[in-house]
Amino acid sequence: MDKIKMTTPLVEMDGDEMTRIIWKILKDELILPFIDLKSEYYDLGLENRDKTDDQVTIDSANATKKYGVAVKCATITPNAARMDEYHLKKMYKSPNGTIRAMLDGTVFRAPIVVKGIESNVKTWDAPIVIARHAYGDVYKDTEMKIEGAGKAELVFTGKDGSESRETIFDFGEDGGVVQGLYNVRSSIESFARSCFTYALEIKKDLWFSTKDTISKKYDHTFKDIFQDLYDNEYKEKFEKAGITYFYTLIDDAVARVMKSHGGFIWALKNYDGDVMSDMISSAFGSLAMMTSVLVSPHGYYEYEAAHGTVQRHYYKYLKGEETSTNSVATIFAWTGALRKRGELDGIKELQDFADKLEKATLDTIESGKMTGDLALITTNPNPVKLNTEDFIKAIRANLEKML
Ligand code: NAP
Ligand code: MG
């Protein structure tokens, strides 16, 4: 069989620990035998980030801007323990944070739905994709503890020195707490654009929800920005694609989501997205079955697994013990990126290959062969638990039958 040829490189961002081990096996077994892979490789493993003073992360984001499509392995975000473990020069920022800031993107997380791993919510039979606006609000707030009586005010001082002020509350002797939040128009607009772009890309309805009836200026601004953009730039495209944009209050949205069949994108403000994404991912089974794609309003795409580097499994692996780490989300990161590359470059074989690799992966699980995390929760009465490498080899066997 001739290997599939590529014309434009894919940006490949390698990572850390168990996912780095998986990355190598996955490429050797599922990608390189079938594709003449053209990739620009960036080693985002923590050692190389330290060696390059994190320049490699910045270079990889710039390469994504150049080529448009990246696939990323999970990476360590250093904390105090990692400083010692890797003898780091400094506590580098999260690579995902750096890349997201440079691409100005929104992260969409989608569960991978497969027979035998049932959702806790009976009606959910198609994925619910969560889009979280990862900027500002309570994550960048300013807070005060008020210890005694006095007036808390909101004051804005314009560049010309003019002031506008609002009383927040007149506190009594027992005091209380006060919090200041902000967001910026350009970030909300980018978020909205990414959501509309991605909805058109995957041809799914887009829901957006805030609490605009209570927050008449703050949340209402989010609602207005989405609506204006939709009316002016996306309405026709949505109608043509046969999808809808639907705004509703957050509490109404939650009630509807619980009764829905899934199959849509749910865009949420920062805090709502933080909370709801954990609910959705746990209801669909396992964090190891959740993909993640960063979509920039400029049309760049970066695909990855939603989980981390699976450190606990890596330490077992280092001791020579057998591991059974789930590679599905990382495989789907690769298929997402290859399919997108194929679409952009008009390479039908690459898109077909991505479809087949996904099907081979799901077929493997449906046939009862799976990793330990899934064997624990499957409704299949006789699951066969495979180790990390054998699971990937079982997928290869299914894939070869399809090619
Ligand atoms: P994690 O790597 O997601 O793993 C947490 C636990 O979830 C694992 O110990 C394992 O449970 C289970 N799990 C996650 N993925 C799995 C998979 N593919 N197969 C089987 N089980 C899986 O989170 P963490 O341990 O909190 O973080 C480890 C490192 O990852 C940290 O350094 C963090 O900075 C980094 N991280 C990176 C990203 C990213 O790059 N996107 C995201 C999150 C975290 P059991 O041990 O019970 O089997
Ligand atoms: Mg959370």
Image: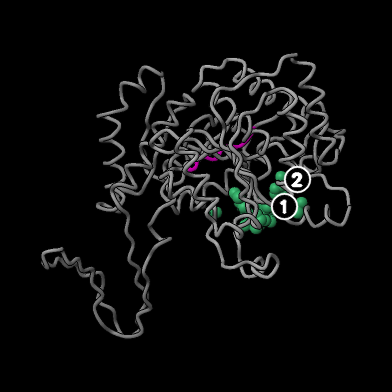
* Quadrant placement of the N terminus: top right
Number of marks in the rendered image: 2
181 with respect to 399 (left or right)? left
Q: Residue beneath label 1, please?
A: 17
Q: Quadrant of residue 339?
A: top right
Q: Is 296 or 236 nearer to us in this picture?
A: 296
Q: Is 296 or 144 nearer to us in this picture?
A: 296
In the image, what residue occupies the spot 72% across and 22% down?
34
Task: Find residue 204 and report its horizontal and vertical position in percent.
Answer: 47, 27
Q: Is mark 2 within 8 Å of ligand 1?
A: no
**Disc 1, SS:** helix
Reply yes or no: does residue 170 show up in magenta: no
Reply yes or no: does residue 110 show up in magenta: yes
**Disc 2, SS:** helix
Is 279 located above or below residue 159 in the figure? above
Magenta range is 107-112
Is mark 2 in CB contact (under 8 Å) with mark 1? yes
What's the residue type where badge 2 is placed?
Answer: Ile
Query: How far apart, in angstroms, are the residues tagged by discs 2 and 1?
Result: 7 Å
Query: Residue 61, labelled with which disc?
Result: none
Q: Is mark 1 within 8 Å of ligand 1?
A: yes
Which residue reaches farthest front?
52
309 with respect to 157 (left or right)? right
Mark yes or no: residue 254 visible. Answer: no
Q: Residue beneath label 2, please?
A: 21
What's the residue type where badge 1 is placed?
Answer: Glu
Task: Find residue 92 and report its horizontal and vertical position in percent.
Answer: 55, 62
Q: Is 271 or 102 nearer to us in this picture?
A: 102
